[in-house]
Structure formats: C-alpha cells, structure tokens
Amino acid sequence: MEQIAYVNGSFVPLADAKVSILDRGFLFADGIYEVAAVLDGKLIDNASHLARLERSVGEISLALPESLPRIQEIQQELVRRNSLVNGMVYLEVTRGADTGRDFAFPTGVKPTLVMFTSVKDIVNAPSARTGIGVITVPDLRWARRDIKSVALLAQVLAKQAAAAAGAGEAWMIEDGKVTEGGSSSCFILTQDDVIVTRQNGSAILPGCTRKAVVALAEERQLRVEERAFSVEEALAAKEAFITSATVFVQAVVSIDGKPVADGKPGPMTSRLREIYVDFARATAV
C-alpha cells in the first residue's frame, strides 16, 4: 500500500510530499516537531503532545496554521489512510518559506505543516524484554532544551555514537550530571526504592511519557524525586530506565559497558511499563 503524508492542507503520496528549499525549517531549523505513538490504531497521550506543541511554538512566536483539534483530526486521518495499527505519527511545523534567506522572521508567510506515519511495534519490541545499553556523551546542545526544536544535530551525533558503540541510547552529561537521553528521559531506582528523574527546566525537554509515568507512579504511592543524578549514582542503583513516545518505558541494563545491578530489566521497570501500556490503551483516541 502506498504511504500517505500530509503537506500544507493536502494528503499526498509520500513520494510526492515536498516543501520549498527556502523553507525556514530546512534553512534555519526554525520549527517545532512532535511524535505521537499509535497503539491499536489510536493515538497515545496525544493531548499531552499537542499541549507541548502549543507551548513550544509559543516560545518561538510561531503561529500554528491549524487549531489543535484540527491537527488531531489530521493525525487520525493519516492513521486511517495508512491503515496504521502500531507505530508513530510525526508532525512538524516551521515558519514557512520566504522569497529568500534572511535570519529575521518574515512577514506574510504561512507556516508549513507536514505529517507522516511510520510502523513500529513498541509493545512487543525485543529490547523491552532484554533492556538496552547506553553510552555517555557530553551534552553539546543549546540553552533552551525545553523547546522541542527540529535543531537536533547534537542529538544526531549522540545517537550515532551510541549506534557505533552497539548501544541503544546515549545519555548526555553536563556538569557531571545526566541531563537526558538523545531522544528520551532518564530514570533510576535507588537502593531505597526512590524513582529519580531530572526536574523539568530549560536543561531538558519536558517529556510527555515521562510526565505520565511520574503521575502513574505517584498515584500508586511510589516515591518519586525530581532531581539531577550522576552516572556513578545510576551505576549504583537498583534499576535504570528511559521513557519516550517511541519506547514507552525501556530498561537500561548497562552504562558505558558497566552493568546496572545484575544487567537485566528490573521488576520496577517492568511493572511501570505494564502500567503505562494499560494507561495508553485506556486513554487512546
């Protein structure tokens, strides 16, 4: 079946989906993106993703070309047209294409909105059973990481370093502390059973899956502490894991080649994954 994408008001075959070479997303990374998971043909935690989209575009004074309800309708229509059962919907909005290349914001230019889907069985991924290794890399990013910018070169380099090392993710380090993964939020479970994840702020992206997992844990009277932690603390922890829309909850079993605990996914991580999947199915749209 031919894959269908959405470009500026039209559903088109993916091979025909194009934007101008003058688009500011291409020239300046002047844009915002979101990735929503799809499970059983429905969008997961999408209200949280759309709220973050609205916040991110607001932080760079970028007007959305469609309302949030309309954007969700387009996402759902893409899922339907592509007969997508499990996977993701990628969304990007840029400041649009001007008649030339100038750093200052153009006037009278309509923002670009594009979306496409991809297939991924997140629930049954083999790494969910085995866990993944991570490597650590310096955090080279800019100061406003809370904005979900399409400027992802530092993350590309981090993820490539992880791939070259045979690892599943890179944890970025700044001032001796873990900020976040290349495309995920980072957690540890301490020896006294406290779930620790870095507090939100300009140093990290406010992860939607992270937010949901923290809330689900607190609802079950699990102890959660939002603060920075070091690699040394992570290696001394009972468990470590990451969260994102593309993995849900994923065990980390080694860091820079050193095992976390016994080098296997721990019971807390496995339980939180089960809880999150149940939440995802119950709240999908």
Image (tube, grey):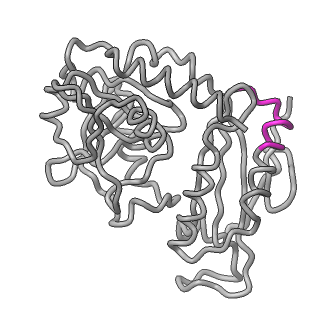
Q: Is residue 23 above or below residue 10?
A: below
Q: In this view, does 131 lie above or below 109?
A: above
Residue 84: percent from the left, percent from the top? 76, 30
Between 201 and 102, the one nearer to me in the picture: 201
Residue 36: percent from the left, percent from the top? 62, 42
Residue 130: percent from the left, percent from the top? 39, 13
Side of 145 relative to 253 (left or right):
right
Residue 83 falls inside the magenta stretch: yes
Q: What span is in magenta?
A: 76-85
Q: Which residue is drawn at 63% across and 37% down?
A: 44
Residue 99: percent from the left, percent from the top? 71, 82
Q: Which residue is drawn at 45% across and 34% down?
A: 216
Between 79 and 20, the one nearer to me in the picture: 79
Quarter placement of the C terminus: top right
Q: Is residue 137 above or below residue 237?
A: below
Side of 243 relative to 262 (left or right):
right
> Which image quadrant is residue 116 in?
top right
Quarter placement of the N terminus: top right
Q: Report the predominant secondary structure element of the magenta stretch.
A: helix
Between 165 and 36, the one nearer to me in the picture: 36
